[in-house]
């Protein structure tokens, strides 16, 4: 079966692409706009460093073949990013390492639409489950994923530099 390279996003004026090194400046701009999110996670925000980390990060013991980093564009402006890990932690499991939209386009249903398209794309690629973590300081993030059918499966900690965040582990099964 033909497998499209990226989720089939059907939102007027929004395009999707895979992000690479050439997109570092645009990604750094998006990180700067989303500084409150990075401050919540890491205690501070250096937009360029965050963008470099997003481009380089891989799920543990995985290669770049299992990383799917998408950018969502309005013309030449990067307004969102989603970083997915394939086959992590298990064979048909997927992991959402990052889902971030520019503050100006939040709370309008864009995130819900993008996730719906992404979930279909993951199913098409044989994914049977999706997991992620949400910081306890981000209850709205938790609410977003709960509305998408995710449930909290546990609580754990996330180490970011010297910082230790309390996080919820969330997951959802994808029925074929
Ligand atoms: C989490 C995030 C990606 C969600 O994207 P979003 O576009 O804001 O989400 P949506 O607008 O689709 O949905 C959020 C809420 O907006 C409201 N909403 C949806 N459509 C709407 C519309 N047309 N008009 C007004 N409000 C609307 C709904 O109340 C929705 O709540 P629900 O989740 O209970 O359905 C985005 O808010 C973000 O980047 N947050 C910062 C980073 C983050 O927290 N990431 C996730 C944690 S890992």
Image (cartoon, grey):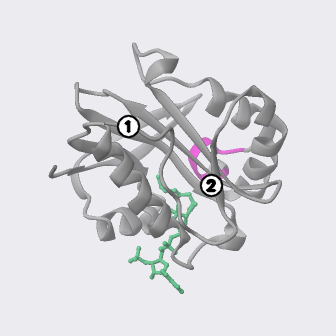
Q: Position of residue 169 (x, y in %)?
A: 30, 46
Does the numbered disc 1 mark a residue whose Cβ is under 8 Å from ligand 1? no
Residue pushed farthest front? 1
Q: Gap between marks 2 and 1, in whole Å?
A: 36 Å
Is 157 positioned to the left or the right of 45 in the image?
A: left
Is 151 positioned to the left or the right of 51 in the image?
A: left
Residue 95 appears in which quarter of the rendering? top left
Q: Nearer the viewer, residue 53 or 126?
A: 126
Q: Is residue 70 above or below residue 63?
A: below
Q: Is residue 20 among what the camera can see?
A: yes
Quadrant where the N terminus sits is top left
Q: Position of residue 40 (x, y in %)?
A: 59, 52
Q: Position of residue 117 (x, y in %)?
A: 43, 58
Q: Which marked residue is nearer to the observer: mark 2 or mark 1? A: 1
Q: Is residue 46 among what the camera can see?
A: no
Does the numbered disc 2 mark a residue whose Cβ is under 8 Å from ligand 1? yes
The residue shown at (71%, 44%) is: 44
Q: Is residue 32 above or below residue 157?
A: below
Numbered range of the magenta stretch = 39-44
Q: Is residue 56 above or below residue 114?
A: above
Q: Position of residue 152 (x, y in %)?
A: 24, 55
Q: Nearer the viewer, residue 62 or 134?
A: 62
The residue singled out by tag 2 in the image is 37
The residue singled out by tag 1 in the image is 2
The residue shown at (37%, 30%) is: 86
The residue shown at (65%, 48%) is: 38
Residue pushed farthest left? 175
Residue 43 lies in the magenta stretch: yes
Residue 124 lies in the magenta stretch: no
């Amino acid at each position: 079966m033909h497998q499209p390279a990226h989720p089939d996003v059907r939102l007027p004026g929004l395009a999707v692409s895979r992000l690479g090194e050439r997109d570092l400046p645009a990604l750094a701009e998006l990180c700067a706009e989303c500084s409150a999110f990075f401050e919540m996670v890491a205690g501070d925000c250096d937009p360029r460093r965050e963008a470099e980390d997003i481009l380089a990060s891989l799920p543990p013991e995985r290669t770049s073949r299992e990383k799917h980093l998408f950018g969502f564009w309005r013309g030449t402006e990067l307004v969102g990013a989603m970083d997915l890990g394939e086959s992590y932690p298990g064979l048909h499991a997927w992991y959402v390492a990052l889902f971030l939209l520019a503050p100006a386009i939040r709370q309008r249903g864009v995130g819900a639409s993008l996730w719906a398209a992404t979930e279909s794309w993951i199913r098409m690629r044989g994914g049977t489950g999706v997991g992620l973590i949400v910081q306890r300081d981000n209850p709205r993030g938790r609410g977003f994923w709960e509305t998408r059918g995710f449930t909290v499966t546990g609580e754990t900690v996330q180490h970011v530099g010297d910082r230790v965040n309390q996080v919820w582990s969330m997951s959802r099964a994808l029925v074929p």
